Amino acid sequence: MSIADIEIKKFENGNCEEDKVFYQAMEEVIYSIAPLLESDDKYKKNAILERLVVPDRIFKFKVTWLDDDNNIQVNTGYRVQFNNALGPYKGGLRFHPSVNEGILKFLGFEQILKNALTGLPIGGAKGGSDFDPKGKSDFEVMKFCSAFMTELHKYIGPRVDIPAGDIGVGAREIGYLFGEYKKVTSSYEGVLTGKPFMFGGSLMRPEATGYGAVYFTETMLDMEGKESLEGKICTVSGAGNVALHAIEKLQQIGAIPVTCSDSKGTIHDSRGVDLDLLKELKLEKRVSLEEYVKVHPEARYIPVSEYPEDGHAVWDIPCYAAFPCATQNELNGFDAQNLIANGCISVTEGANMPSTPKAVNDFLSHKICFAPAKAANAGGVAVSEFEMSQNAAMARWSFDKVDERLKTTMQQICKRVALTAKDYGVEGNYVDGANIAGFKKVADAMIAEGI
Ligand code: NDP
């Protein structure tokens, strides 16, 4: 039995259905770091794994609010404060009906290593609610956010825990959450990131994750001796914050993104997607992608129901580089085989853990350049940390300054990950490189801080 199998066995007992994605994320990390555990017994002696996979604390609370018909609605809110060895807890809030403790543990665990990879002083956390903002009026979203913050404010603070956005939580929700925090605490402080610019948000925070994923990919392709993205067909999934800004940056550098998707279907526009229209549909009108083909009848809309259950239409479209930017486990083994057969040479995870373990193995065994989420989508949290710095100094950075720092940060993460992989004998494997580099940083801090 390998050292990784022995370690994984220790955690099997708590493995319930809800925790499935959490164990998926944990197993990947344990397999990756096996060479590190073998090379230095201090991690075992200090029980780092046992300590790292258990959150410092989890808050679970009731959120009651009044809908527009004056009916009382009840949701559940959570905050998982996972690890603060490197800095205050930091990680997004997700509002989506699928949210439960297991999903937030998976996201919080990934966040610890992601934040460590940025080289910035931030720990890992995640939170959210099973509230679904879709189909709710602005007033309902506001009332929910106020009720959520009435409870959450007890556990957060600019030196304690600084939440941000994630699925279902954008600038509108962060604005309402900030307003309520201010009201209940009477203090005006940088307790949330992703705020609108007019009250302390950083320029470029909305763009950061998508832009950062493209910067990472360009650096990776250059390091691996591949042709750049310029002039190349790219496929992107999702049509939210990360996807739209990945598409935007791809267009800016001369690549041709031809797809996007939402939970109902996929758009394939072979001339390149119309980003202005997408922003109008998704950010302003908040409607289905089906509306896209009403303006561009030459594009194709593929409803989820019209594609085989085994896979996802967006990964069946030939491309040079793919960018899964929607949600976890949205790209499986079937999809990976389609991408590989169609000549894709690079996959960058804009979403958190969008590729299943089978898909990741297929990419690695076919020598596809594969950029794992915790490295490739770290641009969002990096700019969040820049927002914290600006708030603390009462300063405003220009768009160009933030963009330059984001680009440098993504290039540094990419190089750090590639070098770590080389040092541990797995050159070209960015999954192992990211896991080892992130784990080592957090683990060494935990050892230095004692139990
Ligand atoms: P948004 O809520 O802005 O967008 C999510 C998008 O994904 C929507 O278009 C949604 O479609 C689509 N989607 C959700 N589920 C599915 C599905 N099963 N199949 C196809 N499409 C789906 O979220 P973000 O863009 O902020 O987040 C996307 C991913 O990126 C998440 O994994 C998040 O954790 C990760 N991430 C986000 C960061 C950020 O800065 N926002 C930072 C780092 C990671 P629909 O509208 O129909 O639900």
Image (spheres, grey):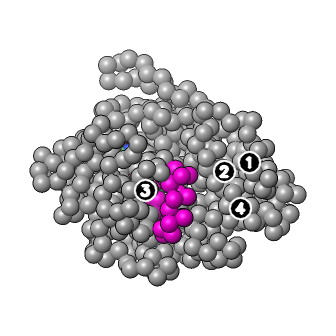
Of badges 3 and 1, nearer the viewer stands 3
Q: Residue at x 61, y 47 (%)?
A: 24
User: In 3D space, how far apart are the residues under numbered discs 1 and 2 (Cα atoms)?
Assistant: 7 Å
Q: Is residue 276 left or right of residue 234?
A: left
What amino acid type is highlighted by mark number 4? Ile
Within-10-Å neighbours for mark 2: few <14, some 14–19, many 20+: some
Which residue is the site of mark 3? 337
User: In 3D space, how far apart are the residues under numbered discs 3 and 4 (Cα atoms)?
Assistant: 27 Å
What amino acid type is highlighted by mark number 1? Ile
Query: Residue 78: image x %, image y %?
Result: 57, 36
Which residue is the site of mark 1? 8
First reached walking from the N terminus: tag 1 or tag 2:
1
Q: Residue at x 45, y 63 (%)?
A: 348
First reached walking from the N terminus: tag 3 or tag 4:
4
Q: Inspect this view and state whether residue 276 appears.
A: no
First reached walking from the N terminus: tag 4 or tag 1:
1
User: In 3D space, how far apart are the residues under numbered discs 2 and 3 (Cα atoms)?
Assistant: 23 Å
- Range of magenta residues: 348-371
Which residue is the site of mark 2? 27
Query: Residue 299: image x %, image y %?
Result: 17, 53
Q: Nearer the viewer, residue 313 or 378?
A: 313
Q: Is residue 429 left or right of residue 264?
A: right
Which residue is the site of mark 4? 33
